[in-house]
Each structure stands twice: as C-alpha cells, then as structure tokens.
Amino acid sequence: KVDNTKYKRILLKLSGEALMGKQNFGIDGDVVKFIAQEIKEIYDLGVQIGIVVGGGNIFRGVSESAKGMDRVSADYMGMLATVINSLALQNALETLGIPTRVQSAIEMRQVAEPFIRRRAIRHLEKGRVVIFGAGTGNPYFTTDTAATLRASEINADVVIKATKVDGVYDSDPMKNKNAVKFDTIKYIDVLTKGLKVMDSTAISMCMDNEIPIIVFDLFGKGNLKDIVLGRKVGTLVEG
Ligand code: UDP
C-alpha cells in the first residue's frame, strides 16, 4: 500500500442508473464488474471507501408518486431498490477479493447489517468497503443526501459523485455543444445557477459541513484512481 493518496477516506456516490449500462432498466453485470474493478484500483492504494448507491435503475419514488402513487410508499420502494443495488455491488467487489459490508438504514438483518456509525468506521479502519443501503431511511430524501450524510458521519475527506458526464457544465452538454465545463465551482453558485450536480439538500449539507464534492465520469478508466491521487479530473465543488 502506498501513502501518496490525496484522500484517505472517501464516500463514493453511484447513481442507480450507472449500474444499468445500455439497458433501460435493472443491473448490467458487466458494468457492475467494471465499476468494481475501478474501486479495486483505489482500494489497493489503501483508501478507505464508503459507498452509497442509488436506486433509479429499479425504482424512483418521485417519478412514481407523480403517476399517482403515495409518495411515502414510493420512497420506501426506492430505498429497497438501493439495497438490491448494494448487494449487486457487494457481490462484484467480493468476487475481486475485497472484503465488504452492507449496512442498511432500514433494518433487514438477514440481508445486511443495520447502519451503526461506529461500526461502519471500524469496518473502514479494518480495510472493509462499506456500502450504505436504503438511503437515509427516510422518505422525501435522495441518495445524494444519503451520500452527504454518511460522508459527514464517517468524516470522509470528499464526496466523489460518479456520473456519465465528465464534470459540471453551465448547461447540459448532451443538448448544447457549446456548454462550458467548470474546473471548480462554489457550492453557492451550484445552488443559485440551479446546476444539476446533486439536489439542493445535498449541496447545502456539503456546504455547511465543508465537504468538497468531485463530479466525474465513472466510465473513464482510471479516473477514480486519478482523483484519489490528486490529479485534476472532473469538477471540484467547494467553498
Ligand atoms: N429514497 C428515499 N430516501 C432516501 C434515499 C432514497 O426515499 O434517503 C428513495 C427515493 O424515492 C428515490 C429512490 O429511493 O427516488 C432512489 O434513490 P435515488 O433516486 O436517489 O437514486 P439515483 O437517482 O441515485 O439512482
């Protein structure tokens, strides 16, 4: 293990959609394997890794409640979806020989440990990757908020938010080819410009707790490793 990483303890946020690859629903095994390999690269550097996975590839509460479903029930279904993704990721990491624990914000003892902060930190110190499932355990929140909450709780150095784009732009780069990418941007500008980095609850929580966020393209091989080594990748959101 080397000691030249910029970040010693990170919280990696993966959206559920990241796991579905080119499919329009569910989990693509090859994509999960790729993600696990990228995580192994930084695990091997000795970085302590907490992960929050979304559930949007399976179920998203807001969209379903828009179609008439009760919001709270829909949100619980969304949280359960994140547990399914957590188990998929756990399996892929363990296949690569990385010890992991899934901790769920909603108790389901047969499937995952309950979330216990001190225990999570202990796992990290012992070199286990901790995957936090079931979001915050509360409806009306998102897994972005769960990521910033868990990052604060485990004293992570940074929230690393994996996306399909290589950073934060002033407009949607998929729609506008003149969109300009930011190398760094302030939390408050993300909020006032309404940029789609994370929802505003998550951004303001990072702002209040001074946790930097790095937004990057997960599918660029080696990007994650470059980030923890302190190389310039993606967009840094900070004070
Ligand atoms: N969710 C929730 N509380 C949380 C985290 C998630 O109610 O603390 C629900 C919410 O319905 C959300 C769904 O779980 O739509 C899936 O999470 P999210 O949409 O954040 O996943 P992502 O967009 O990252 O795939």
Image (cartoon, grey):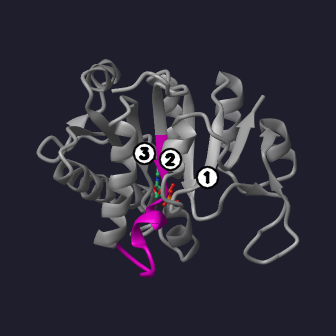
Q: Quarter of the image holding residue 208?
A: top right
Query: What amino acid is labelled 3 in the image?
Result: Val
Which residue is disc 1 drawn over?
216
Disc number at residue 34? none
Residue, x 38% and y 33% (percent of image)?
A: 45
234 or 63, which lies in front? 234
Query: What amino acid is labelled 1 in the image?
Result: Phe
Observer-side mark, 3 or 1, equals: 1
Asked if residue 163 lies left or right of residue 11, the reply is right
Q: Are marks 2 and 1 in contact (CB under 8 Å)?
A: yes
80 or 23, which lies in front? 23
Residue 169 is a magenta residue? no
- 124 above or below 224? above
For label 1, the SS is: strand
Q: Are marks 3 and 1 in contact (CB under 8 Å)?
A: no
Asked if residue 96 lies left or right of residue 20, the reply is left
How busy is the neighbourhood of tag 1: few (under 14 within 10 Å), some, or many (20 plus)? many
How busy is the neighbourhood of tag 3: few (under 14 within 10 Å), some, or many (20 plus)? many
For label 2, the SS is: helix
Which residue is disc 2 drawn over?
224
Calculate the distance from the C-alpha at mark 2 to the C-alpha at mark 1: 8 Å
On the image, the x and y values in percent for residue 140 come to 54, 49
Which residue is disc 3 drawn over?
52
Query: What amino acid is labelled 2 in the image?
Result: Leu
Residue, x 45% and y 43% (percent of image)?
A: 138
* Quarter of the C terminus within the rendering: top right
The magenta region covers: 12-26
